[in-house]
Image (spheres, rainbow, N blue to C red):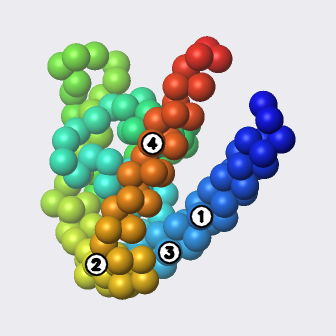
Amino acid sequence: MKEGEQELFSTAAITSFRLNGQFLAIAEELAASAGLTAARWQVLGAVLTEPLPVAGIARAMGITRQSVQRIADLLVGDGLCEYRPNPAHRRAKLVVATASGRAAVQRIDPHHAKIADRLVDELGPTEFAATVAALTRLSAALDVIADDKA
């Protein structure tokens, strides 16, 4: 690796760490408006459109299966999600959002929309879309690198 490339990699990593912290702070604030934490919102959000097993949520979110299991159990205990049988795998139950879980996420939506609007105002719609595309490509490239090491 050339020195300039190594510097770019380091800057990308440091910027990503900072960005992660910024997103987590915003997510905590948004989630609190619905009586959730960012972690609970993250897991609940993963199953809004389709039921998923804990391992599927972990893969989609890039977090450990154990942490998802812990959060899913809390969400089930609070009545925001429920476990259902998984026809594809007897032991890996599906996590499903309940009506209460969906309502909690809907309480976040107005605040979420305001933040999105402010980002568009700051960056402009074209630059915001390009930024999201670049972050998506970066994440996919890191997945390829991780898969190559496995």
Residue 53: horizontal and vertical position, in percent? 33, 31
Using the numbered discs, state the Cα–Cα distance from disc 1 to disc 4 in whole angstroms.
16 Å
Check whether the beta carbons of the residues at disc 1 and disc 3 lie within 8 A of each other. no
Sequence order check, earlier mark of 1 and 4: 1
Q: Residue at x 41, y 72 (%)?
A: 31
Check whether the beta carbons of the residues at disc 1 and disc 4 lie within 8 A of each other. no
Image depth: mark 1 or mark 3 in front: 1
Q: Which residue is mark 3?
A: 26
Q: Which residue is mark 2?
A: 113
Comparing 51 with 126, the one in front is 126
Q: Residues within 10 Å of mark 2 (few under 14, many from 20)?
A: few
Say which mark, if any, is on residue 137.
4
Q: Is residue 27 above or below residue 57?
A: below
Indicate left or right for 143 with 15 as reference: left
Q: Residue at x 66, y 60 (%)?
A: 15
Sequence order check, earlier mark of 4 and 2: 2
Three-letter code for the amino acid on which mark 2 is drawn: Ala
Q: Which residue is mark 1?
A: 19
Check whether the beta carbons of the residues at disc 2 and disc 1 lie within 8 A of each other. no
Residue 62: horizontal and vertical position, in percent? 50, 40
Kind of element beneath mark 3: helix
Three-letter code for the amino acid on which mark 3 is drawn: Ile
